[in-house]
Amino acid sequence: MVPRPSRPTVQDVARRAGVGVGTVSRVLNDLPNVAEATKRRVQAAIDELGYRRNSAASALRRGAGITIGLLVDDLADPFYSLVHRAVEDAALENDWALLALSTAGDGERARRQIAGLASRGVDGLLVMLPEGSREADVLHGVEAGTAVVYLDRPPVSTDADTVLADNRAGARLGVEHLIARGHRRIGCLADRAGIWTSRERVEGYREALRAAGIRPDDALVHSRVGPHAEAGAVIERMLRLPDPPTALFTANNRVTAAALRALAADRIRLDIVGFDDLELADLLDPPLTVVEQDAERLGATAALRLQQRLAGDRGPATHDVVVPRLLVRTP
């Protein structure tokens, strides 16, 4: 039996035209940000190869066939899972395919994942840059014209669309609450100092103290707090100080959980305000007051900006800020 010739693919068209798969996708979907000369080259390759889209795809309304990528630290983290859900809702509404990946905070892993997404011709990207990573390195190989929105952390050297939480303002809210409850010695437990959000929250903590006339004490500020044993050791060192803390500000949900476990193990009670909510936080004794980020709004705002770019918006970069709120549960 004579083998049936294989049907030309988008990849075949891209190779013939000397462009990436994403460019072919944009031409097929009549999307902007493709030079006229490139369009003509892609169309010539389509004609030469006899490429035809399948009838079901051709019947879809404009917007169908678009693929976007979402890159965050950890999809298992409750905060990022809410961001993912909001982006997924937007993808369903717009008939986009969504590819979501976790970087584990590793720049090389992020670069390889972005390269994989680019090879599949993604039309847009929502990117959380890993700690210490530059966007030029992570997005190396992404075609010019691909819509990119930076989420949760700003790019290092590019004026680009960003959607960020106001981390400083949120931290100030939490520490101001502790000060209003009479605390003046407030410990701060944070994530790695190299993470932009962590630095912003620690600075917000310091700003709240200074505004209240309290001099920040470096002995009460600890970064890279993670597992239970580490949190316990840090808290133990602070409690041995001549003037120990009477309260704690914990700068993300993982650090808060580690601090709560350490305090419970040693049967120590300290007033705590955490940045980011925890599941069952209202059932703790006492209930936990938190600075609550609107993760779904963060994801939805980023997805909307990406949608505008994919629809042809070529205006200047926008910088959206989502302001956290204080959720008071402490009696």
Image: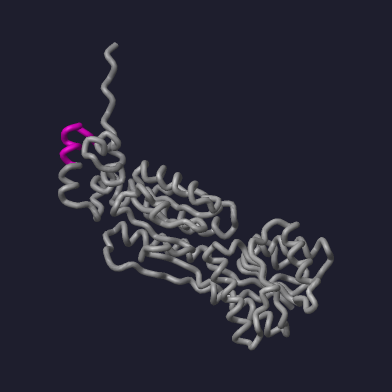
Which quarter of the picture shows residue 15?
Answer: top left
Residue 99 in picture, x, y percent from top left: 44, 47
Q: Residue at 19% across / 37% down in the picture?
A: 45
Report the magenta residues as a range.
43-52
Location of the C terminus (image quadrant): bottom right
- 297 vs 254, nearest the viewer: 254
- 262 vs 195, nearest the viewer: 195
Q: Does residue 136 appear to the left or right of 77 in the view shown?
A: left
Residue 297 in picture, x, y percent from top left: 48, 66
Q: Magenta stretch mostly in which secondary structure? A: helix
- 237 vs 32, nearest the viewer: 237
Q: Does residue 123 appear to the left or right of 238 in the view shown?
A: left
Vertical relation: 139 (above or below) 237: above
Which quarter of the picture shows residue 223?
Answer: bottom right
Residue 14 in picture, x, y percent from top left: 26, 39
Q: From where the camera sits, is residue 23 visible?
A: yes
